[in-house]
Image: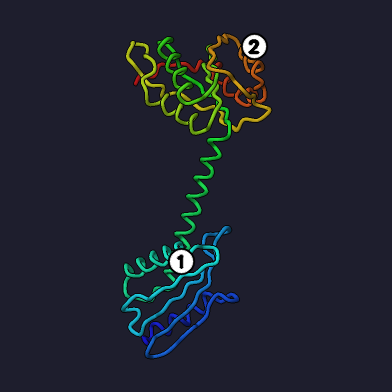
């Protein structure tokens, strides 16, 4: 057996020094070394996996043989992990690699856990109802613009309000991914015209607030309703009517700033 393999085993015994983590199963000049590493991979919700590495006498000139077992995984899953480790070993340079293979498996499992977590979050977002308030810069081509907004809410299964006045606000309720798609459409589709009559996109749209719907921010908006609010009291009443007073208080400072600075300007595409 190579000196590098013997030295690596010594290092591995120091790295995996917890109870039951490392075991030297076999050591002979004819058959090489067999080591077992018992590891938990995948973070907090990780799996207990037992990895058996057979380091042949010519190792590391040739990659190790690997066996994988786990009480938490099926035989097919263990076989899949084993094949991935063998492929990774074959692609590695001819140098001590056992620790790197274990670390690589840890990273792969962590990425898988992260992806699963992201998928779970997306599924929850589809089921949960969110409320968002958007501000628009201007609406000149009224029929076209409002028609598109109403069409998008229907297509994306959203409900809401369009409040027209010194501040132009869109209140939306529905699944968060659908609200995000609504915002994307606003910034990528030519929905209005600028002061010269040229078609333009709503690049000045801002999301004032986006929050998980609760008892304090209203429930059950029906359809898409357009309402004129030419004064602050009318705007306040509009939010009170749909039980969103608390949410309105959160965005009010921004609205006051805009009214004081006359924040309405043309933005041509």
Q: Is residue 121 above or below residue 47?
A: above
Q: Does 30 sit left or right of 20 as displayed?
A: left
Q: Earlier in the sequence, mark 2 or mark 1?
A: 1
Q: Position of residue 266 (x, y in %)?
A: 40, 16
Q: Does 125 sit left or right of 144 as displayed?
A: right
Q: Position of residue 33 (x, y in %)?
A: 42, 84
Q: Is residue 237 above or below residue 21?
A: above
Quadrant where the N terminus lies?
bottom left
Q: Is residue 59 above or below residue 261?
A: below
Q: Which mark is residue 233?
A: 2
Find numbered disc 2 in the image and state the secondary structure of the residue it sits on: helix
Tell me how many marks there are: 2
Find numbered disc 1 in the image and state the secondary structure of the residue it sits on: helix
Q: Quadrant of residue 227?
A: top right
Q: Position of residue 69 (x, y in %)?
A: 49, 69
Eye-nearest disc, 2 or 1: 1
Q: Relative to the observer, which residue lies in front, 85 or 139?
A: 85
Q: To which residue does mark 1 refer?
A: 103
Q: CA distance from mark 2 to mark 1?
A: 62 Å
């Amino acid at each position: 057996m190579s000196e590098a393999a013997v030295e690596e085993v010594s290092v591995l015994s120091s790295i995996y020094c917890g109870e039951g983590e490392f075991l030297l199963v076999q050591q002979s000049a004819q058959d090489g070394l067999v080591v077992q590493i018992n590891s938990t991979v995948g973070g907090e919700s990780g799996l207990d996996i037992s990895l058996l590495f057979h380091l042949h006498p010519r190792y590391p000139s040739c990659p190790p043989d690997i066996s994988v077992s786990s009480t938490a995984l099926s035989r097919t899953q263990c076989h899949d992990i084993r094949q991935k480790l063998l492929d990774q070993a074959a692609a590695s340079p001819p140098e001590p690699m056992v620790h790197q293979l274990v670390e690589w498996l840890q990273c792969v499992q962590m990425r898988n856990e992260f992806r699963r977590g992201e998928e779970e979050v997306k599924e929850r977002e589809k089921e949960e109802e969110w409320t968002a308030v958007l501000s628009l810069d201007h609406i000149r081509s009224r029929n076209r613009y409002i028609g598109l907004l109403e069409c998008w809410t229907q297509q994306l299964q959203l409900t809401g309000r369009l409040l027209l006045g010194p501040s132009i606000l869109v209140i939306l309720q529905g699944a968060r991914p659908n609200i995000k798609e609504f915002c994307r459409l606003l910034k990528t589709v030519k929905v209005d015209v600028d002061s010269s009559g040229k078609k333009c996109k709503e690049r000045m749209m801002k999301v004032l607030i986006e929050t998980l719907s609760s008892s304090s921010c209203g429930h059950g908006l029906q359809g898409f309703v357009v309402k004129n609010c030419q004064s602050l009291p009318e705007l306040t009443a509009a939010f009170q009517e749909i039980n969103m007073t608390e949410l309105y208080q959160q965005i009010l400072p921004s609205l006051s700033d805009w009214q004081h600075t006359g924040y309405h300007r043309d933005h041509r595409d």
